């Protein structure tokens, strides 16, 4: 087979550009549906524009709403991080509290001695 090196390079460039195009398309459509400030009709209009005239639609969207894309992405990332921290905080707090309450119940019922209770409590609080 005769396939010159320049043709291999150009094929690689075209494949890269094709993949880049799809990434842009998915980012724009994802941003459209993530934006809570736009009405449903506006989202439908942008989707129609992006699907019917893809190159022009994507470039116009990036020019018109590009700055907002970064801000929305940043807000979503900060919210996800705050939600994760809150979840971890609640889970950790509830885990220690539940273990300590079980230990108190065991001590009150006489299942463990005061000495065993203090040792178990120290282990729970150290973890």
Image (spheres, rainbow, N blue to C red):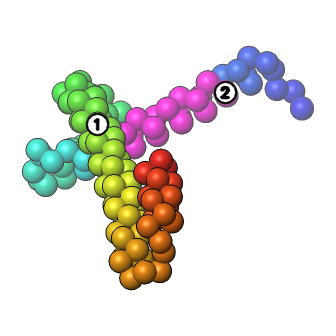
Earlier residue among tags 2 and 1: 2
**In the image: residue 86, left or right of residue 13:** left
Mark number for residue 12? Answer: 2
Q: Is residue 61 visible?
A: no
Q: Secondary structure at mark 2?
A: helix
Mark number for residue 78? Answer: 1
Q: Residues within 10 Å of mark 1 (few under 14, many from 20)?
A: few
Q: Is residue 96 visible?
A: yes
The image position of residue 70, as x and y in percent, is: 28, 29
The image position of residue 63, as x and y in percent, is: 23, 24
**In the image: residue 47, left or right of residue 102:** left
Magenta region, residue range: 11-31
Q: Secondary structure at mark 1?
A: helix
Q: Residues within 10 Å of mark 2 (few under 14, many from 20)?
A: few
Q: Main secondary structure of the magenta part?
A: helix
The image position of residue 29, as x and y in percent, is: 32, 45
Q: Residue at x 40, y 74 (%)?
A: 107
């Amino acid at each position: 087979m005769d396939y010159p090196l320049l043709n291999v390079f150009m094929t690689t460039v075209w494949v890269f550009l094709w993949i880049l195009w799809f990434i842009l398309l998915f980012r724009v459509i994802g941003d459209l549906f993530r934006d809570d400030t736009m009405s449903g009709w506006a989202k439908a209009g942008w989707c129609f524009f992006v699907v019917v005239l893809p190159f022009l639609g994507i470039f116009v969207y990036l020019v018109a709403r590009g700055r907002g894309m970064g801000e929305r992405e940043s807000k979503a990332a900060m919210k996800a991080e705050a939600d994760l921290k809150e979840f971890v905080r609640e889970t950790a707090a509830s885990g220690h509290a539940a273990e300590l309450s079980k230990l108190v119940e065991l001590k009150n019922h006489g299942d463990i001695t005061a000495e065993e209770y203090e040792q178990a409590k120290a282990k729970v609080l150290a973890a």
